[in-house]
Image (cartoon, rainbow, N blue to C red):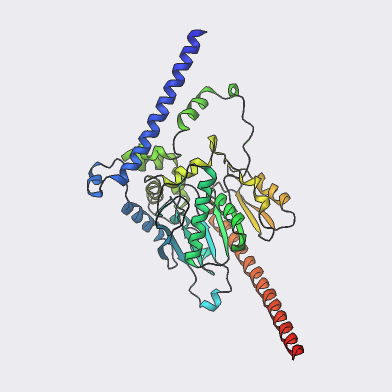
Amino acid sequence: MALEDQSSAELSKGLRLLKHTCLLADTLLSSLIDLVPSWISSYIRWCPTSAEHLEEAERKLLSYVKLPIRSMFVSVDSILGCKGMHQIRTLQLGPGRSAAADEERVPLVLVHGFGSGVALWLLNLDDLAQDRTTYCFDLFGFGRSSRPRLSRDPLEAEYQFVQSIEEWRAQVGLDRFVLLGHSMGGFLAASYALRFPERVAHLVLADPWGFPERNAPRPALQLPSWVRVVSTLLSPFNPLAAVRIAGPWGPRLVEKIRPDIGRKYGHIVNDDQAVPHYIYHCNAQTPSGESAFKAMMTQYGWARHPMISRIGELHQGVPMTFIYGSRSWVDKQPGIRVQRLRPESEVDVEIIDGAGHHIFADKPDQFNEIVTKICRGADAAEKTNRSLADADEREEREQREMLAQLAH
């Protein structure tokens, strides 16, 4: 028995050492990209990536979008714990109507999920922006946006993301808009709506991550030994550390691990490597947002602070729609629970048959149709609200004029 205990202790010690060694390797590789001058790093770079590579990969995918794109970097500051000015990569599209006509349409803002970026909306942008101004941006720490060191505290990291979205909104000059977030972006969109409900005309959550509470953990003996070993080995890693540790084999690794991603875009994108290479270059650089996401989740991918425990506090005047894929791994029950939590509010649940987690790419036509319908509903609601506000203003003005006449 003593020998078994000693062997177990040695194995545990060995696993801890391997964990810290791998974590150090990922951290050092990420840091070298920032510390080594570019003319030297081009010779010794382990990861075959750069800002220029990512820019070119993004450009290639966006070339398939038919509508004119206004691309820009929006400057933000005053982000908790992030000194200085930072940039948020932004795309703006629209139908090119007159300003007066555009005022009748509520803008749409798209927030991507974990490990993604603006270019992966390419199957949606032409349809969604055909009758309204549509924005999408790379989240802080992802894509071509700035990658400052973000907090390792889960609530503080969440707040930094939300604060960056609000700073972005203010700089772009939006008042109210339809806010759509996918996966991790759905979690952050919900968090934003909780803090700034006056800005959200409709909250759309596409297969959102981070809603359910963590299930009661199974007894250790019920888990196969290999699951416990793999979980132990991977727990210190950033989720996509393997992409960077793989170095020059990273692009091929992305293609091998997720060959389905490229196929989702195959009917539009005629280069099989374009999508996986974009995903690679989005995630092979400094893992700023990735590290913050890791801080926000527990082992096996649960949120440390599940949104389901907070979403009931959302202002009842904010309508919501959940959109799930019928084949997705994301739990659909939170959408049903939110309907019960908000009986006085509009909460719809849509399920797209045959779609997986990437519903916007799996079934783009159905997804675009649902979102367009939501946006047009928001247009009608905003028009009604403006009419009511104008009527109230007229009534107040008439009362003031009447009082003024009586005073004379």
Q: Residue furthest bottom?
A: 408
> Along the line of sight, which residue is nearer the eye, 268 or 59?
59
Residue visible at 74% across and 57% down?
Answer: 344
Above or below residue 262? Residue 370 is below
Looking at the image, the residue that sits furthest to the front is 407
Question: Where's residue 171, x and y in %?
Answer: 47, 65
User: Which quadrant would the C terminus be assigned to in this image?
Assistant: bottom right
For residue 374, what is the image quadrant? bottom right
* Residue 88 located left or right of residue 330: left
* Residue 76 shows in the view: yes
| Apparent side of residue 48 relative to residue 82 in the rendered image (left or right) | left
Can residue 48 be seen from the camera position used here? no
At 68% from the left and 74% from the top, the residue drawn is: 389
* Residue nearest the observer in this picture, 382 or 288: 288
Q: Going 71% across and 86% down the picture, which residue do you hit?
A: 401
Q: Residue at x 44, y 21 (%)?
A: 13
Q: How far from the left and from the top, in percent, is residue 20?
A: 40, 30
